[in-house]
Image (tube, rainbow, N blue to C red):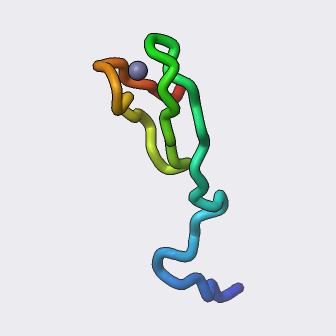
Amino acid sequence: MALNHECAGADRKKPNVPEILECPQCGEEIEMWTDETEKKCGNCPYVEKRE
Ligand SMILES: [Zn+2]
């Protein structure tokens, strides 16, 4: 029987990094982080959603 030595909160496999996207409606840069599933454009009502 193996013991798990995982610390709480240390089980994320992907690092949280920003991804720069371009708004398809106004061309504004949208900074979406890895842990975010949707992000509103700062310049228009468009909301970028991750699949
Ligand atoms: Zn926009």
Image location (x, y in percent) of residue 21: 58, 31
Location of the N terminus (image quadrant): bottom right
Residue plotted at (49% across, 34% down): 30
Residue plotted at (60% across, 43% down): 19
Residue plotted at (48% across, 75% down): 9
Residue situated furthest top in the rendering: 25
Image location (x, y in percent) of residue 36: 45, 44
In this view, 11 is above or below 43: below
Please state which of residues 13 and 5 is positioned toward the viewer in this rendering: 13
Q: Is 25 situated left or right of 18 in this image?
A: left
Location of residue 26 (image quadrant): top left
Q: Is 7 situated left or right of 40 in this image?
A: right
Q: Is 2 situated left or right of 30 in this image?
A: right
Q: Is 34 situated left or right of 36 in this image?
A: right
Residue plotted at (60% across, 55% down): 17
Location of residue 14 (image quadrant): bottom right
Image location (x, y in percent) of residue 31: 50, 41
Image location (x, y in percent) of residue 34: 56, 48
Residue situated furthest left in the rendering: 45
In this view, 4 is above or below 25: below
